[in-house]
Amino acid sequence: MKVLLIVIDGMRPDSLKGISRAERFISESAGSLAARTVCPPVTLPAHVSLFYGVNPDLHGVNTNEFTPMPVQLDGLFDVLFYADKHCAFMNSWDEFRDLYHPGNIKHHYLTQDYDYDKYYLLDRMVKDETLRYLATRSPDFVFTYFGWTDIVGHTRGWMSSEFIEAVKSTWNLAGEIIDTLDDEWTVIVTADHGGHGRDHHMDIPEDMNIPLFFRGKDFRPGMEIEGLSILDIAPTVAKLLGAVIPEEWEGIVRV
C-alpha cells in the first residue's frame, strides 16, 4: 500500500462543478463535498492540523507564521518514520518547513521563489518533481501541494472566472500525476480551506467547507462519508500504512 496526498490550496467544493477531471475522480472515490477544515481556516494552521492531527487550540498555530507548539506532538511524518516508511514532500511554500521534524523524510522539494503573478509556474515545477520522484524512487507516502488557486482567490476573488480556471488547470496537473499510479496507490485529494470575496478567515461555510476524497481499493466509489474533517486525514493515512496512531490525534480513521 502507498498513499499520495494532494492539497489544492483554497479549493472550494462548489468550484469543482463542470471540471471533468475533478468530477471523474470524485465518482471513483469515497468522500464528501461538505468536509470541514479547522478554524481559523488559514493555510498554515490548517496544514499543521492536517499533519499533526489536532485542532489549532492544541497545536497553537493560528496564523501563517509558525510558533512553537505548547505541547509535544508527533505528526504524520513522525509516525510514518517510526514505521520505517519512505516519505516525500513536494511544495512551493517555505512556511511548510515545520510540518515535519528534520530527518524524518527522505526527500523535500521546495521550489525557488517567483513573483505571485507567476506562481502557476511553481505548481508545474511541483508536478514535474512529483512525477520524477515517483518514476525513479519507491516512496510509501507523498505529499504534493499546489498553491496557485489560493493566489488567484486573493487577487481575483473566490469563484471568479479566473479562480475557476485556476482550479481547472490545477486539476489537470494533479491528473497527470494520478494517471501514472497503479492500484497499489490510495490517492487523497483535498483543500486546506475555501474562501469568500478575496479572503478566508471566518467560520462560515464558504471558508470552512472543503472537498475531501479518498480513491483506492479500501474505499467504495461514490460513497458519501458524513462528518468528514481535515483532521481525519492523518489517522487514515497512518492506518493505511500500518503506523501507530497517537492517542492525542483528534480525527477519525475512515478506512
Image (cartoon, rainbow, N blue to C red):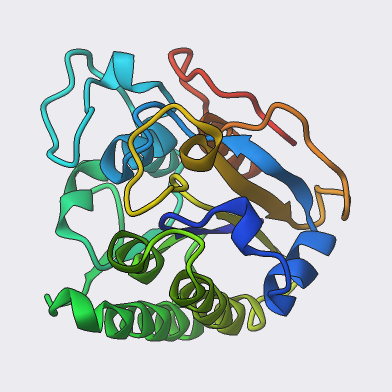
Percent of width and height locating residue 21: 70, 77
Front-lying residue, 156 or 65:
156
Q: Residue 168: x and y, percent?
A: 56, 77
Residue at left offset 67%, top offset 39%: 34
Q: Which quadrant, please, contains the N terminus?
A: bottom right
Residue at the (31%, 45%) spot, across then down? 43
Is 36 positioned to the left or the right of 224 in the image? left
Query: How many numbered marks does the figure carry?
Result: 0
Choose between 176 and 88: the one closer to the eye.
176
Left or right: 187 with respect to 108? Answer: right
Q: Is residue 114 left or right of residue 129?
A: left
Q: Residue at x 15, y 58 (%)?
A: 94
Residue 234 on image: x %, y %:
51, 36
Q: Is residue 243 visible?
A: no
Residue 186 position (above or below residue 226): below
The part of the image, by quadrant, that contains residue 114 is: bottom left
In front: 44, or 116?
A: 116
Residue 249 vs 88, above or below: the answer is above
Q: Position of residue 72 (x, y in %)?
A: 23, 17
* Residue in the picture at 22% in, 20% down: 60
Q: Please tell me which residue lies in front, 239 or 27.
A: 27
Is residue 209 something that shows in the picture? yes
- Quadrant (top left/top right/bottom left/bottom right) for the C terminus: top right
- Residue 67 image-quadrant placement: top left
